[in-house]
Amino acid sequence: MRIAILPGDDIGPEITAATRQALEALDEKLELGLNLDEHPMGLATLESHASTLPTEVLEAARAAEGVILAPVSTYDYPPADQGGINPSAQVRIALDLYANIRPSRVRAGVRNVAADMNLVVVRENTEGFYADRNMFIGSGEFQPSEDMALAVRKVTAAACRRIARTAFELAMRRDKHVTMVHKANVLKVTDGLFVRQVLEVADAFPEVRLDEMLVDAMAARLIREPEAFDVIVTTNMYGDILSDEAAALTGGLGLAAALNAGDEHGVAQAVHGSAPDIAGRGIANPAALMLSTAMLLDWLASRHDRPRLAVAADLLEGAVDAALAETVNHTPDLGGDGTTESFAAAVAEHVRGSSVGDTQ
């Protein structure tokens, strides 16, 4: 089982090393047969390869069964025509990763704003208002004159249908409740198309209860009643914002995991950025990337009919939860004095000490 690891920028290599330590402990414990291949990219290859995402790295990601992509510092990249390719966007486009799945739930030992919350935001990942992924050639943002800038929003029926199906299939494995979020009262054409496609897909899942909310009302109710939601399906920008809000209610972005998935490929990618302000200090929280990796293992288990990988996914998430339950392991973003290395060691220790897999 080949896993391509793209270590990213700033804190990326640090949390990648921590995640790799946990994966190696899992591999040893469960005999998963993982082949972990790390490929330099980002600022590390800009000078040597004139690109932040060399062609051979993208091809390695395409050839692997799964990918772990650490945070990247696109703000520091030069323009694309000078090699500053956004690896996150390019990987999503090249591998057709149309579903961005972002869970948020209350975890023991972590200071949470929400008392009770366990939801998943299912975000369309390949179009919308995001200028780097909605045009075949060029950018979706352009400036016709000095004092006017325009942005194009792309919404297609096909993309809406497949993200809706992803959400309903996920809901069938959870509490069978989907909330569709849109702004069709104002964006009647683009969000109207999204709404119609979701409703059409919903007809194939009569067991699932479907609600709908306007995005502004959703942002408010998510704070007041986070326990009211199970699976939230929405377009790209709304999903990006709402999932960050959900993360803030359950410990912050340091715990915000995500899986980018398509029909053929899956990529683990934490929601947070590359945090250049703390890079090299050894205090970055690796939990989000570890939890994203657990989601990838679960996705691989289903895709390749490898039940042992599902066991590994549960074990990894359980080990992260066990480490978080002990406040001595908390990194500064969680209010503690822990380090990246100490958190990684605690997770690996919980993996090795678990009885899971001993009788598998």
Image (cartoon, grey):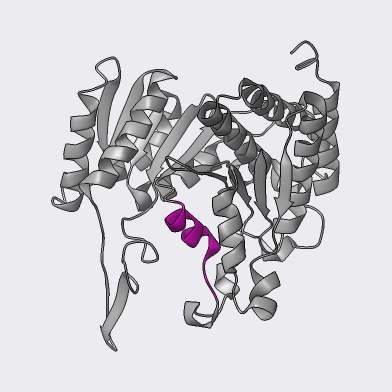
> What residue is shown at x 41% (from left), y 17% (from top)?
175
Magenta span dominant secondary structure: helix
Q: Judge left or right: residue 70 versus residue 29.
A: left
Give the left or right position of residue 231, taking residue 276 as reference.
Answer: left
Q: Position of residue 132 (x, y in %)?
A: 40, 66
Q: Residue at x 66, y 22 (%)?
A: 308
The C terminus, quarter of image: top right
Quarter of the picture containing the N terminus is: top right
In this view, the residue in front, 218 or 274, is 274
Question: Is any part of residue 223 visible from this angle?
Answer: no
| Identity of the residue furthest to the top in this view | 359
Does the magenta-highlighted stretch encompass residue 167? no
Which of the two residues, 19 or 120, is positioned nearer the viewer here?
A: 19
Question: Quick one: 80 or 273, which is closer to the camera?
Answer: 80
Q: Residue furthest bottom?
A: 146
Number of dots carrying numbers: 0
**Whether residue 193 is situated above or below residue 94 in the rendered picture:** above
Relative to residue 42, is residue 204 depicted above or below?
Answer: above
Please state the horizontal and vertical placement of residue 124, each as a whole percent of the image. 36, 46
Decide if residue 197 is on the left or right side of residue 40. Answer: left
Q: Horizontal and vertical percent for residue 100?
A: 45, 44
| Magenta-colored span | 84-95
**Image location (x, y in percent) of residue 276:** 68, 65
Instruction: Name the residue: 33% across, 39% down.
Output: 163
**Image quarter for residue 344?**
top right
Residue 55 appears in the rendering: yes
Res 122 quadrant in image = top left
